[in-house]
Amino acid sequence: MTAGELVRVLDLAEQPMPRELRCAPGDWSLIDGQQIIKMHYQSDGQFHGAQLLGPSCVELHRTAADAA
């Protein structure tokens, strides 16, 4: 965040999930509005790896980020 990164955390205990986020669930990062990095975790919460999603996913994730 100190480098200008915008971090969004949505507490679903306080409100329902916005419709726009249902199409882009999970933990992911939108990098410079151009690339989507999807995070993967093991069942115990330990980080398992990341995956670069294809360009067809960008607009959907931009919409989800705006909704968050």
Image (tube, grey):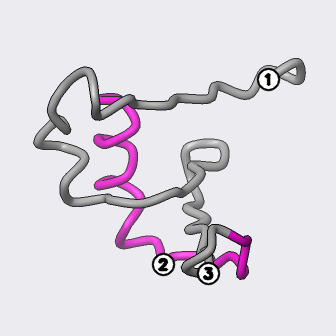
Disc 3 is placed on an element classified as loop
Q: Which mark is residue 54?
A: 2
Camera-nearest residue between 39 and 6: 39
The label nearer to you, 1 versus 3, is: 3
**What residue lies at 40% left-to-right and 31% top-to-bottom?**
10
Q: Is residue 24 above or below residue 31?
A: below
* Amino acid tagged 1: Met
State which tag comes first along the sequence, 1 or 3.
1
Camera-nearest residue between 51 and 14: 14
Q: Is residue 66 left or right of residue 50?
A: left
Q: Is residue 9 above or below residue 58?
A: above
- Assign the N terminus to one quadrant of the image: top right
Q: Quadrant of residue 37?
A: bottom right
Residue that carries the numbered disc 1 in the rendered image: 1
Residue 28, image x, y percentages: 54, 57
Quick check: marks 2 and 3 in contact, CB under 8 Å? no
Q: Quadrant of residue 68?
A: top left
Q: Is residue 66 above or below residue 43?
A: above
* Amino acid tagged 2: Gly
**What residue lies at 73% left-to-right and 28% top-to-bottom?**
5
Residue that carries the numbered disc 3 in the rendered image: 42
